[in-house]
Image (cartoon, rainbow, N blue to C red):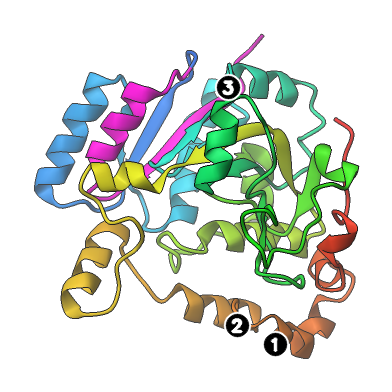
Amino acid sequence: MDKKIGILFTARNNYKLLDSWMNMVDIEGLEVLSIDEDSDKNNKEQGKQICEKHNVVYMHREERGMQNNIVTACNYYKPKGIEWIIWFQHDCFPFTNNFFTELNKTLSSGKCNKFGVLGFNAHQAKASMYQLERGNQELDVTGRAPLEPGDYWYRNKKYWGKSRPDYSNPEFKKPFAVESVAWYSAMVNIDMYLEHIIPTDDYHFFHAWDDIAFQFLYRNIYNVCLPSFDIKHDKDHKVALGFPVSSPHGNAEQNSLRDHLYGKWGHLEVWKERWGWDYNARDEFGRVEEQYKDTLLSKFYNHDPANGPLKSFDL
């Protein structure tokens, strides 16, 4: 079976995490591309050495920002016959046995080619990770939901009490539609991305994938969670390697470290300017809903995930 997937990392002064990820994960014969997002001189040299060590392709960014990096990756992988790009945060790890081989089989049917962003069942709650490691698969974090009622996420009520989806609904066992995937890892079809996404350098990291997902929704293209594919988002792994558990912000020292690791901030202001409402204020969407009439954005805004997913799919 032809390999349809290329792996992508975007790196900024954090190559120890890439080194660790490559040591821990069986990439099952896939190619890995790492695009550097303006690391400092010492980190770039370290990155080149680590990439050479693991046979990872090192590339300096062409234009700033996650969305432009994906364009670069599309242009790199497409001539090689690769159809899909899967991106990982460095503290996110595939868990399902033969993850990439099984994912390749799922994609080979062509039934996913009509979708926008694909995501997975991300285990972030420690209790959920504990169950997963003992062979008890359950849904944990499966999507982000700023438009629907709830806590802005699709998460397991057992661990996240304010989350609204009812995972006992059997439709959640199938691939199902989400506003935006839980982008600890995310996947896009190269042709769909190049055709439908208008990239911007305004998002260096945060909300870049949400913006991509919403561009697809605006064009009535579904973003989908594949719930049978498990990933682990292990924040403690970053801490063990000397990185902050989450993006630091506050005083000048913290902001400097944040910029060192993530680049440009201000993503919430960018979101409001581009989409017309505050990402963290669902009710504001009501004021601009008319301009999104007859799109999936409006359909999600008027949907309650307590009743099940907006749509599920038989693949």
Q: Earlier in the sequence, mark 3 or mark 1?
A: 3
Decide which of 127, 213 is in the foreground and name it. Answer: 127
Marker count (numbered)? 3
Q: CA distance from mark 3 to mark 1?
A: 40 Å
- Labelled disc at residue 278: 2
Determine whether label 1 and label 2 are within 8 Å by CB.
Answer: yes
- Residue 81, quarter of the rendered image: top right
Residue 40 percent coordinates (x, y): 15, 52
Q: In the rendered structure, which amino acid carries the disc numbered 3?
A: Phe
Inspect the magenta stretch and tell me whether residue 21 lies in it.
Answer: yes
- Contact, mark 2 vs mark 3 (Cβ under 8 Å): no
Q: Nearer the viewer, residue 92 or 34?
A: 92
Gap in Å between the C-alphas at discs 1 and 2? 7 Å
Secondary element at image label 1: helix
Q: Pointer 1: residues within 10 angstroms few (<14), some, or many (20+)?
A: some
Q: Please provide the residue range marked out in magenta.
A: 1-27
Looking at the image, is 302 positioned above or below residue 61? Answer: below
Task: Of the two numbered discs 2 and 3 on the same chain, state the one appearing first in sequence.
Answer: 3
User: Residue beneath label 3, please?
Assistant: 100
Q: Is residue 88 left or right of residue 13?
A: right
* Mark 2 residue crowding within 10 angstroms, few (<14) / some (14–19) / many (20+): some
Q: Secondary structure at mark 2?
A: loop
| Local SS, label 3 | helix
Q: Which mark is residue 76?
A: none
Most foreground residue, 106 or 141: 141
Residue named by callout 1: 284
